[in-house]
Amino acid sequence: MATDHHGLEGSAAGGAEAAVRTYLDRIATREAEIHAWAWLDPDLALAAARAADAASEALPLGGRAIGIKDVLDTADMPTAYGSRIYEDHHPRWDAACVAALRAAGAIILGKTATTEFAALHPARTVNPLDPARTPGGSSSGSAAAVADGMVWAALGTQTAGSVIRPASFCGVVGYKPTFGTVNRSGLKPLSEFTDTIGVLARTVTDAASVIAAASGRPELRTLGTPPARPRIALCRTPYWEQAEAPAREALAVAADRFRAAGAIVVDCELPAACEGLADAGLRILVREARQALAHELRTSPHLLSTSLRQLFERDDPNDPAPYDAARRLAMECRVFFDDVVFSACEAILTPSTPGEAPIGLTSTGSPIFNHLWSLIHVPCVSLPGLAGPSGMPVGVQLVGQGGRDGALLAVAKWAEQALSPGD
């Protein structure tokens, strides 16, 4: 397992500069194998750390080192979006969330690797727990850097499953807030309907504090106490047959531990219409990605990966009917969850991924247990603490009601303790 460096930040380790030096030492030792970073300037990071140490004002993230997924613009660092087209691209301003993190005192350590335009084509990043396996995508560098102790936390983005899946594969916490919680200005878009800025971190509390700062929602920094007996709906989803034995076992173990900790866990069956969410998600993603990358497709198609060009071919730009139907289904299912499921529970328990991180680096794994939640715009947290037969992490996912992130995070913090008693 990766060395745990999550406490090495701010004054807890003798100052921001000391913490950043520790992270940079770790990166120097491990980056040649892990390939978690798209861009890094140690001198710039150390200068920011010294400025944080000299600051007289106490800030929410004062001295915390954070990585930024390389689909989010940074004014003082290049942003390539994982694409050859933008290898020397230097934005003139920060993405809104990056500016907010700086204002909260965070040190932007560098840019973490991403798949091409946060889509399909993998980066060079490997899983730090087993370099033969994928770290997941598209927030591959963010998950790997946090898991390997290279940084305190890192921003990611999720269109289908790009925060939750790599969190599960790398054994860290992944938090995708309610859609729209974090302003997307300065994010290279892929799908307007689902693109969401989230975070990879070592604990639920750390993840919540990053999103609190990035979104201007300070209430998320203080996680409340869930009900004494939280009501948790166990949802295997319509895609349960795609869950491998490790994911099935992890879900059963998590449910048992939650019951032992006092939760009321009941099964939750989704209506037949929800089975169509997987296909709907793909239809929406393909059409919106083709529109979002229209300039690149027109001017530089030879610099796009084959997998991305093939994805575009699945959309008929002259027939919007399937896309419109897919959006309607997503909105109808959203109403069902609001009116029926979340009237009876505080959170849904469901798989994070089909199983352990797959062997091989040509794919980032399946988002089958993520995309449906992205489509209905609800907050999700992937929790580590369980492992499969190969010793690789297998996360479990808690899903909350849209707009009630604080309630979900409170349950997630309670669940985190239930999954790792004594840690």
Image (cartoon, rainbow, N blue to C red):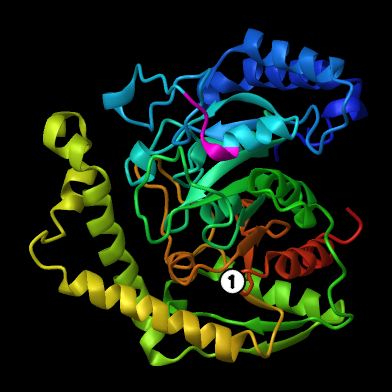
What is the span of residues highlighted in magenta in the rendered image? 93-97
Give the image quarter of residue 344.
Answer: bottom right
Give the image quarter of residue 248.
Answer: bottom right
Residue highlighted by disc 1: 402
Q: Residue at x 50, y 35 (%)?
A: 126
Q: Nearer the viewer, residue 342 or 413?
A: 342
Q: Residues within 10 Å of mark 1 (few under 14, many from 20)?
A: many
Q: Is 96 covered by the magenta stretch?
A: yes
Q: Residue at x 75, y 47 (%)?
A: 209
Where 257 sits versus 268, above or below? above
Could you tell whether 106 is left or right of 72 in the image?
right
Residue 143 seen from this side: no
Q: Quadrant of the N terminus?
A: top right
Where 76 sits versus 378, above or below? above
The x and y percentages for residue 316 are: 10, 61
Q: Magenta-highlighted stretch: main secondary structure? A: loop
Residue with the most extreme top position: 43
Where 138 sits versus 367, above or below? above
Q: Is 288 covered by the magenta stretch?
A: no
